[in-house]
Every structure is written in C-alpha cells, then in structure tokens.
Amino acid sequence: MRVYEGKAKRIVPLDEGKVIMEFKDDATAFNGGKKGEFKGKGSLNAQISAVLFRVLEERGVKTHFIGVAGDNRLIVERLRMYPLEVVVRNVVAGSLKKRLPLAEGTELAEPIVELYYKDDDLGDPMINRYHAKALGISEGEIDEMERIALKVNEILKEYFASRGVVLVDFKLEFGKNGRGEIVLGDEISPDTCRLWDARTKGSLDKDVFRFDRGDLMEAYGELYRRLVGDS
Ligand code: C5P
C-alpha cells in the first residue's frame, strides 16, 4: 500500500476510493526553511478542518470530507489533485505586500484570487491561466476552482466573523473525484489560513510560528475554542 507523506500530513489509502488524511505535529515555513514540532497541532488542525468542511458542505460546497477517524485523522474521498494552490485574499498581508504598494491590514474592496504552482524545487511560484494551460489545466477547470474558492471565501468570511475572527487570506487545493467532479481537497486550518482576532488583530494562525509571535498551540487552541464554542 503506497503511503504518501508530505510536510504536514500523511495520506494512507483505504479501499473504495477513500483515503485517511493523518495530520502531523510538524510545522514548516518558508518552503521548509524553518521547522518545528508542536505536540497536539495535528489533532487541532484535523478537528478544525472537520468543522470547516462541515460548514462548507452544509452550504452546498463539494468537499472531499467524509468523516473523522480519530484525533488527528480524517477520512476523505480519494482525489486526483491538481498541482495548484489557490489563494484568496480579503486583507493585505503576507506575500501580497511584495506585489502591491498597500499597507498590511488594508481591506481589499474585492477579494484577490491567485494561483501558485505546487513545486518545492521552484519555490511554489505564482502562475497565471496561461501557465496553468501549459500544464494541461483548462480555462474551464480554472474557472470552476475560482468559482468554488470565492464561494468558500464568502461562507468562511462570515462564519469566522461571527466568532470574532477576520479571515485575512487562505489557500485551497482542488482535485477531481472518480465522477470527474472538481472537489475541494486538502485541509482548511490555521496552517493554511491567515486569521486575526477581530479586536486585537493578533494572529491565530501559522504566522505565530513563522514570525515567533508567541505560543502557537495557545493561538490554535484559542481558534478552536472560538469555532466550537457557542456563538
Ligand atoms: O505567503 P502568502 O501571503 O502568499 O500566503 C497566503 C495564504 O496562503 C496564507 O494564509 C498562507 O498560510 C497560505 N499558504 C499555504 N501554503 C503555502 C503558501 C501559502 O497554506 N504553500
């Protein structure tokens, strides 16, 4: 049985077109340039992803999520993944500051969608639709991923806001299922989203690790409590 191991997750095949997605406690940033390990991070990310996938499914977004299979494990539909990262931004932060002359924290009038090619050796470069086409990904497929990404943004922006959290930006990955549908895959967690406390603007995400902004597990734990607590 082939087990795929990435930087933050392990994928173990199950039968009937399903796989187990096991979340690790490892943390990496800056394309593997910074490494750490945080006991319990895998469990929190798995549980947070499960909460968010359920929210999306309830609102009509097709995701690979099937169920929870333990503290740090989710059962998901097996997908053929696109080698793309689709980033959606609502507020200026992170790498957008290197691209546009806008200050951190500036609210964008409309969300920005960006495509990146997933390749460690190339450093996950930003690409456009022409590059995607050269990789064999059609305009129609990109349109569909963008449509879903913007819908996810609308749903999660409101959901986080109701819990006192600003959805600054996030990264999604997509794949095709056995029926040829484009489906949301991977994870949605504080490892893959930028989330700020609405009041203090403090980070409740991986920026705590990237920029040594305090206790990562405290931030992830606080986010989890906000999501599962009564709103
Ligand atoms: O670094 P940048 O500002 O481009 O990141 C935008 C968003 O995408 C952030 O929420 C970040 O956590 C996420 N991201 C990710 N995986 C990457 C690159 C970015 O989850 N490889």
Image (cartoon, helix red, strand yellow):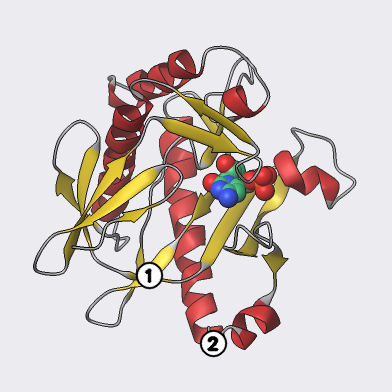
Describe the element under mark 2 as helix, strand or loop.
Answer: loop
Asked if labels 1 and 2 touch by Cβ distance under 8 angstroms, the answer is: no
Q: Nearer the viewer, residue 79 or 139?
A: 79
x then y, percent, for residue 212? 65, 18
Q: Which mark is residue 215?
A: none
Q: Is residue 112 left or right of residue 145?
A: right
Q: Quadrant of residue 39?
A: top left
Crowdedness of circle 1 by 10 Å Cα count: few (<14), some, many (20+)?
many
Instruction: Name, please, the residue furthest toward the right.
Output: 101
- What residue did someone put label 2 on? 136
- What residue lies at 28% left-to-right and 38% top-to-bottom? 51
Q: Nearer the viewer, residue 12 or 69?
A: 12
x then y, percent, for residue 25? 38, 30
Instruction: Name, please, the residue furthest toward the left.
Output: 16
- What residue lies at 55% left-to-right and 60% top-to-bottom? 85
| Distance of label 2 from label 1 (alpha carbons) | 14 Å
Q: Quadrant of residue 90?
A: top right
- What residue did someone put label 1 on? 175
